[in-house]
Image (cartoon, helix red, strand yellow):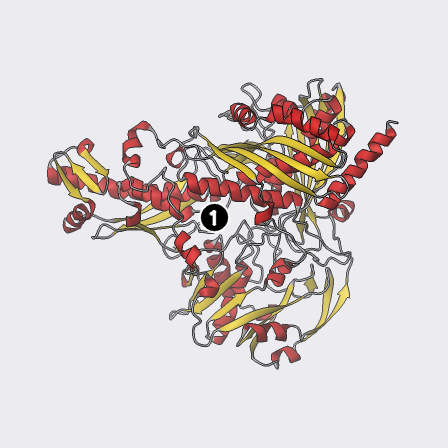
Amino acid sequence: MRRLVVNSELSPADNAEKISTAVGGVGHSIAHESAHKHVRGTAEYVDDLPLLPGTLFVATGQSTKPHARVHSIDLSAVKSAPGVIDVIVQSDIPGKVDVAPVYSGDPLLAGDLVEFIGQPIFAVAATSFVAAQRAALLAKIEYEELPAQLTVEDSLSAQSFVLPQHQLLQGDPDSKIASAPHKLNGEIYVRGQEHFYLEGQISEARLTEDGGIHVISSSQHPTEIQKLVAEVLAIPFHRVVAEVRRMGGGFGGKESQAAPLACIAAIFAQRNRAPVRYRMPRRDDMVQTGKRHDFLNRWTAGFDHEGKLLGVDMLLAGKCGFSPDLSEGIVDRAMFHADNAYFLNNARILGLRCKTHTVSNTAFRGFGGPKGMMAIETLMEDIARKLGKDPLDVRKANLYQPGADETPYGQKIEQHVLPELIERLEQKSDYRARRLAITEFNKSHRHLKKGIALTPVKFGISFTAKHLNQAGALLQIYTDGSLLINHGGTEMGQGLYTKIQQIVASAFGVNVNRVMVSATRTDKVPNTSPTAASSGTDLNGMAAKDACDRIKADLIAFACEHFSVTAEQIIFKNDVVLLGEQQLDFPAFIKLAYLNRIPLSATGHYRTPKIFYNRETAKGQPFLYFANGAAAAEVTIDCMTGEYKVDRVDVLHDVGKSLNPAIDIGQIEGGFIQGMGWLTTEELLWDEKGRVISNSPANYKIPTAFDVPEIFNVELYDEPNLENTIHLSKAVGEPPLMLAICVWAALRDACSSTTDYQFSPRLDTPATPERVYWALQDCTAFNRSRI
């Protein structure tokens, strides 16, 4: 069951009429622009494109050691294998070898040193996908093995990090913890997550007549593709065009990790004067590309008799892998969200970026935020059990409030949404009555136990790297009244293109079918930021609106002179233009403007205001605003086996004034289920030699349709953004994932019920049935200790 609550007015009063009169425009629940193509199977992804004559296919030869020096490589059997056209090693790269996104450390092909099992050492181009895969297995490589750090604990023991540590400090946590009436220490290990997008990593490179390269990629960051391909080939940026029409899912895994495929394909295309397609099979994808970071979180906290925090000292140690990749921002965001929705009062938050000889971990929906939140939510549970309180009451007691509204990094909370939002969800979900009913159920059932939890989410919206908070757009209007918009964002199924369509349609008061969004290309809009950080619509929507406003300004000036009317008398609505007492349909008006030589194309640009962060002082305003939400989950566990099911979930989520309620609801549902998978079933595992053993759908379990709660209520919290975002909406991409923390908390609650709620067992994530079983054993041991 889904519930949808929206308000149709989505902008300040002076723009309300213009927006509401666009057919299918902002505020309407129209279908995803490619939905019918998805259903019919006609949506084209990279591997659906017709093969050009002479297309070559790529595979890579990979390291079998986690940390070693390469003594010798014999590729003679590879080169003579059937179908092989070309083989390259690091020395064959014509330009830059390092393809790291920020800091150095990511060689396209390994040289004398390998640092994780699966690291590419050489690449093969062959006449077929199968021929390339088979040939890559024929290499003979000799290694000198070196000591390997494979775990966070290994890194901490060796004090080995990919980047320097960073610390947030608020007040005097040491003295406040020392003098607090109650103290707790705690730890939780939160495992990472495989992106498991439907479409794996893939790129195709084609030569252009001027010696350049056209790359069609499944990437969240076309500009990075353009830049790195140009640097690897040692050619100017303007000779490379990167194009992305759509992805079959991204979730952060195609922000930085798509670039190596594009670069290798481009090298082969340049060397062999042929089109090249490089598609990773699922197993290679799961071995060679990064995942969500594991985090080891530790803390010491002091609190009063009501459970209010007086001081917190927290350590967040992220498992980064062998190179920095995007780990600076990821661990920073974990630190920025270690407070989640709570005023910490006095806090020290130390972030460590641990080096391990495993694949370099990368962006994943939430970008570190979920890992920081898990630390504070675990602490909230522990405080409640220590004091004999309902965890919801402890959470509510610690919420940010006016007067207690400064984060550990110095940003003031200016819109206090959560107290009222949580109160509303508490009532709508009937939390208190269900808590009583669950307690009674647990008393009368020996082997089945129920749990319930209600948890909040406060998630900062903006890139933490300030320069990425900008976007561009190119709008063109044709003389038949149709509009074509290009922008720097990429479509990975989240509905960005649909929302941009609606924004443009609303700006001109036309039917949304008049607007088409074209494939993202670096020769249309340059220097784009990745579609990440939940900022795709915020940034590109405002850039598109800016382009609309520029054209409209010229059209209005023309109409004032041509029709002798004032600007106030000109209204764009319902596919017509009202000009005082006259009116023209939109195509006729555009044709007239063209005949009078009025420009009908414009570029738009937007940069996020207000944001800054001083890394030396660890203070600033890294986020323009916060998206908020809360979710309540009820679960049932089998105490004999640890197996469980999620019975019911209620969500109330803050998206400001929704641009498209149906798409926002879909994002909330999808994000929640993905978060639930991260916390319950998706277990990333390595063996003692550093080999990924969760490397296929057979041994890595994402949620299925059967795991979706039978009762799943999702409602939008209707309050406009106080910041001047696109039509006062809020981002919805990442925040819903963290709503699923309520499922983990409910499982822990069910376990705790076996001790009359006096003990919180350790429940590392994912909370698989095995881990739930062992948490129940801890509860049994606690009960025995009291006898």
Disc tally is 1
Pointer 1: residues within 10 angstroms few (<14), some, or many (20+)? Answer: many
Residue at position x 56%, y 80% from top? 83
Residue located farthest toward the right when viewing the structure as drawn: 787
**Residue 288, x across and y down, in percent:** 63, 60
Residue at position x 45%, y 33% from top? 610
Is residue 727 in view from this perspective?
yes
Measured along the vertical axis of the image, is residue 213 above or below residue 158? Answer: below
**Residue 390, x across and y down, in percent:** 67, 24
Q: Could you tell whether 623 is left or right of 191 in the image? A: left
Q: Amino acid at mark 1?
A: Thr
**What is the secondary structure assignment of the residue under circle 1?**
loop
Quarter of the figure with the C terminus? top right
Q: Could you tell whether 370 is left or right of 509 in the image? A: right
Measured along the vertical axis of the image, is residue 209 above or below residue 508? Answer: below
Residue at position x 78%, y 57% from top? 147
**Residue 318, x across and y down, in percent:** 67, 44
In this orientation, which residue lies closer to the viewer: 325 or 651? Answer: 651
Q: Could you tell whether 589 is left or right of 66 in the image? A: left
Q: Which residue is mark 1?
A: 531
Measured along the vertical axis of the image, is residue 593 above or below residue 619? Answer: below
Looking at the rendering, which quadrant does residue 138 occupy?
bottom right
Looking at the rendering, which quadrant does residue 411 occupy?
top right
**Residue 607, x across and y down, in percent:** 41, 40
Is residue 334 in view from this perspective?
no
Q: Could you tell whether 530 is left or right of 501 in the image? A: right
Residue located farthest toward the front when viewing the structure as drawn: 444
